[in-house]
Image (cartoon, rainbow, N blue to C red):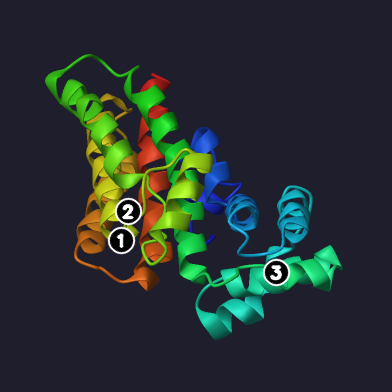
């Protein structure tokens, strides 16, 4: 069997995740990060932090370039973060060192990674809201829906806390909130997803696999809430997100 049922073509109908599956792929992760890098360059060009022609070239290239995730493996193993390797691959793909030398200018790679994650979580929350509105009306459903606007406002923010002026400009372009440390925000979103999925589990078919999935999700979230480090997030967050979506998909299909 595969390491995750959500990556398995054999288990895809037993644990369906709908459109959310595409959000937790390397392709989506890289595309979101390239969007942030392009927006960062555009903002820095407007501020004259980097040459305007380089900013234009980087921004346009970020929407066109194709990066192979497998080519980032060595860099990720070395840095523990995929952004430096992505920047190196982006630099090579642009074939314009006079412009690419301004990539990630005076910027923490983790800020780019966190902001890119927030873009994907924004889409995930939209998918979750759509599914949640189709569940039977109840006080719990109403409470979860009423909490969502505040979660969007307080959690879906860019991560440029060390450069809030640049972060604010990026936030305005990407339609995210003002800069903040994302660690707590990510856990707030994970907790809301878990609560939503727990409600969905009541409407989903009562099968041994769904019972196991519900217990798996609740246990993962409990462990995740006790962590504060970045390294735990790729281990827990995709599993929490896709477990919640699987229960929602099955609940809304009934």
Element at label 3? helix
User: In the image, is 12 to the left or to the right of 250?
Assistant: right
Task: Tell me the distance, in whole angstroms, between the alpha carbons under discs 1 and 3.
Answer: 27 Å
Name the residue located 62 percent from the left edge and 80 percent from the top edge.
Answer: 75
Most extreme residue toward the left is 139
Tag count in the figure? Answer: 3
Asked whether the residues under the numbered discs 2 and 1 touch, taking CB atoms below 8 Å apart as contact, a structural biologist would say: yes
Q: Where does label 2 land, which residue?
A: 186
Task: State the image coordinates of residue 237 (x, y, percent, origin top left).
Answer: 38, 56
Q: Where does label 1 land, which residue?
A: 183
Asked whether the residues under the numbered discs 1 and 3 touch, taking CB atoms below 8 Å apart as contact, a structural biologist would say: no
Which mark is nearer the camera, 2 or 3? 2
Element at label 2? helix
Q: Which image quarter: residue 207?
A: top left
User: In the image, is 243 to the left or to the right of 92?
Assistant: left
Disc 3: CA contacts within 10 A as few (<14), some (14-19) or many (>=20):
few
Name the quarter where the C terminus is drawn: top left
Q: Where does label 3 land, which residue?
A: 70
Disc 1: CA contacts within 10 A as few (<14), some (14-19) or many (>=20):
some
Most extreme residue toward the right is 95
Task: State the image coordinates of residue 243 (x, y, percent, origin top left).
Answer: 38, 45
User: In the image, is 30 to the left or to the right of 158?
Assistant: right
Name the residue located 74 percent from the left edge and 63 percent from the top edge.
Answer: 68
Most extreme residue toward the front is 48
Mark 1 or 3 closer to N-term?
Answer: 3
Mark 2 or 3 closer to N-term?
Answer: 3
Q: Which image quarter: residue 229?
A: bottom left
């Amino acid at each position: 069997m595969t390491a995750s049922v959500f990556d398995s073509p054999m288990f895809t109908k037993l644990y369906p995740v709908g459109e959310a599956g595409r959000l937790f792929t390397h392709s989506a992760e890289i595309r979101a990060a390239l969007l942030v890098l392009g927006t960062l360059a555009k903002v820095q060009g407007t501020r004259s932090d980097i040459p305007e022609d380089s900013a234009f070239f980087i921004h346009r290239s970020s929407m066109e370039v194709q990066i192979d995730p497998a080519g980032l493996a060595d860099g990720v193993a070395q840095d523990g973060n995929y952004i430096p390797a992505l920047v190196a691959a982006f630099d090579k793909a642009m074939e314009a060192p006079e412009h690419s030398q301004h990539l990630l200018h005076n910027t923490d790679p983790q800020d780019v990674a966190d902001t890119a994650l927030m873009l994907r979580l924004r889409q995930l929350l939209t998918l979750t809201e759509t599914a949640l509105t189709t569940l039977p009306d109840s006080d719990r459903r109403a409470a979860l829906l009423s909490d969502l606007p505040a979660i969007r406002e307080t959690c879906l923010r860019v991560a440029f806390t060390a450069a809030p002026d640049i972060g604010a400009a990026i936030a305005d372009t990407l339609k995210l909130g003002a800069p903040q440390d994302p660690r707590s925000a990510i856990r707030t979103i994970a907790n809301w997803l878990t609560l939503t999925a727990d409600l969905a589990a009541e409407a989903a078919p009562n099968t041994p696999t769904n019972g196991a999935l519900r217990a798996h999700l609740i246990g993962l979230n409990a462990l995740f809430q006790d962590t504060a480090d970045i390294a735990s997030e790729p281990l827990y967050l995709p599993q929490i997100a896709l477990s919640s979506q699987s229960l929602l998909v099955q609940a809304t299909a009934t």
